[in-house]
Image (cartoon, rainbow, N blue to C red):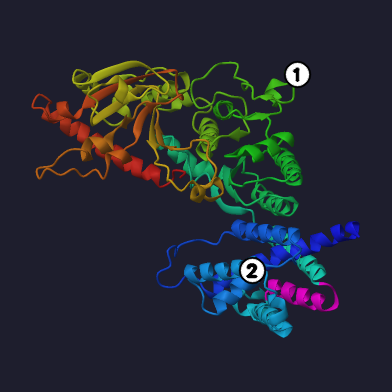
Amino acid sequence: SLAQSVFDMPPLILMSVLCTATGALTVTDRFPKGPDGDPAPMEALNFDRELTTVGVSSVLLGFTGGTLTFHTFTSIQLRLDGGTHRISVFCVALFVFGALASGVPFGHYIPKWFLSGLFMNTAFHFLKGALLSYQSLPKVYWRGHTFISLQYMVTLLAIVTSIFFSPADAIFFGLILSVILFLVQSARASPVINVLTGNRVVSRTKRPFWEMQVLRAQGHRILLLYLQGQLFFGSAQRLNAVLSAAIAGKDVRYCILSFARVPLVDPSAARHLKNMKEKAKLVGCKVICCRTNHAVFGALIAADVITDPDEDLIMYLRGLKWRTKSTRSSKNLEHKQVNLPSPRKFASPSPGPLIQAEPDAFAHETDALDYCDELLVKDFCYCGNWRYEMTDFQVAYRDACTEGIRIDEHAFEDMHNLRRGLMADLKSYCEILDGLTKWDKVADDSPKFGSSLCFIMRGSVSLVQFLAQADQQDMLLPQVRGFSFREGKRLRRRYPPGHVVGKVAFFLDQEDKHGCRKVLSRDLLPNLVVSSKFGATAEIWVLKRSVWDSGQFPAGLKAELTKMLCEQLADDAQHANLQEH
């Protein structure tokens, strides 16, 4: 009956799909490249096209009273007979079309045993390849013993099942075993790809030597875990075990989880993370998430793993028009599906890195590290009566960073071991850019900017590099390169007040006596952009290279600045060894 035929269709369709995929793989394994003269030697196997061909041919055969078949049998036999060129395939297609159009009953002239032998030959190649597949599968090592791969055992069990039951039942049984094997292997694999401590990795914000020394001594209180793969109930348990071991020590205060290479988080895994976050809170450890894609962010928000996103992260989410339920900082909103709100502020506004009360999610690893580093520096460097214990230039630097005020010339000089009065002598040769606001490009405010040194007296400057995007977008999916909110841009470093930027272009983007420039490419030089951190406005002194090379620039002043710039370049290289990449 028709109803019975409908129930028989799924096994036939499943067998058709499996035979098509297996046959296509067999062809490509036996013939990895086409013959000489192949017009498309680099053409990749397209399963969608193979399955579409099978589907269309089966529909045509069904409407014309034919029998369901699998075109891969014919293609495999064609390849085994040597007909690998497209002209051969075209000739065979013309012959088959002519035979169908003519209506000649070939079935009455071609012996039935020939067709049976054709199918038996194909089945023999399938069976031979399956039985000998253990030679190409990895071995399993357990307690010093070597065993055959579990994937091969699944193949053998499917073959044995096909002897006593229908082929459809064997395919379904093998599929179930493969899914179980995949889940077991995924649960055993560690979702943590790398673990770093805060004394071996710091944010991309440049810090003076006394703060770096504190981070080297106390940075072990920060853990940065890079996660990978999909997180479900099995892998989440492994992650919880890693987190429990990581925060077992009483010194760990902050645990940063990077989800850049996590495409999806299962609801059960999100609940495991929520429970782990609460347990970590009991021992004084704060769990912080960063670089989550849309799906992962939604899962973590729904499970209350993320409750207070950072202000910059909220800005990115609004730009991407992500919608999710309201966070803790906007419980006065009526609807659950709303645009993300603004975060809570400190009672006393501060333009420095700390602008929000205890955020638990950031856009990037460097933002999370910047937040944690700042808290460690505040607790172990600027604590107690630190204003009376530290030097005047250290106090002035800290005030410039936290209050957004201008660092005076004497503090700048003492910070870099320069003689008193040097900045006053330098000022007359510089172009003063004052009142710059966040995201302003320094070059736009100085038309003849060129290769110049920029002395930061207030605010901060970010070195932002614009990355060229490859044409093959499919090769650069977020699962491969890691998710990022800053597509096409990369923050190289952020310099607070009291530093000098533009040193690389200043020295290398100049012609030597042979007329050569040592800079590799001007496109690789980062753009100088006023940062939104460390104050609402910026003041920058710009010393142009043309003024430096002119005869009016004092030689003594040039020598003193050269010594300072050499020390800063060495300090930048030292910071790069610890900087998060």
- Mark 2 vs mark 1, foreground winner is 2
Residue type at mark 1 is Glu
Residue for point 52% across, 30% down: 378
| Circle on res. 334 | 1
Residues rendered magenta in the picture = 149-166
Could you tell me residue 105's position as x and y percent? 70, 74
Residue type at mark 2 is Ser
Could you tell me residue 462's position as x and y percent? 39, 31
Label 2, label 1: how far apart the Cα atoms are: 73 Å
In terms of depth relative to the viewer, which is nearer, 42 or 502? 42
How crowded is the residue under tag 1: few (<14 C-alpha within 10 Å), some, or many (20+)? few
| Circle on res. 102 | 2
Left or right position of 95 against 232: left
Could you tell me residue 577's position as x and y percent? 40, 47
Left or right position of 433 against 476: left
Residue 533 belongs to the span the image colors magenta: no
Q: Secondary structure at mark 1?
A: loop
Q: Quadrant of residue 301?
A: top right
Residue for point 25% across, 21% down: 447
Q: Secondary structure at mark 2?
A: helix
Q: Quadrant of residue 168?
A: bottom right
**Sequence-earlier tag: 2 or 1:** 2
Residue 155 belongs to the span the image colors magenta: yes
Left or right position of 175 against 100: right
Residue for point 60% across, 76% down: 77
Q: Is residue 44 above or below residue 29?
A: above
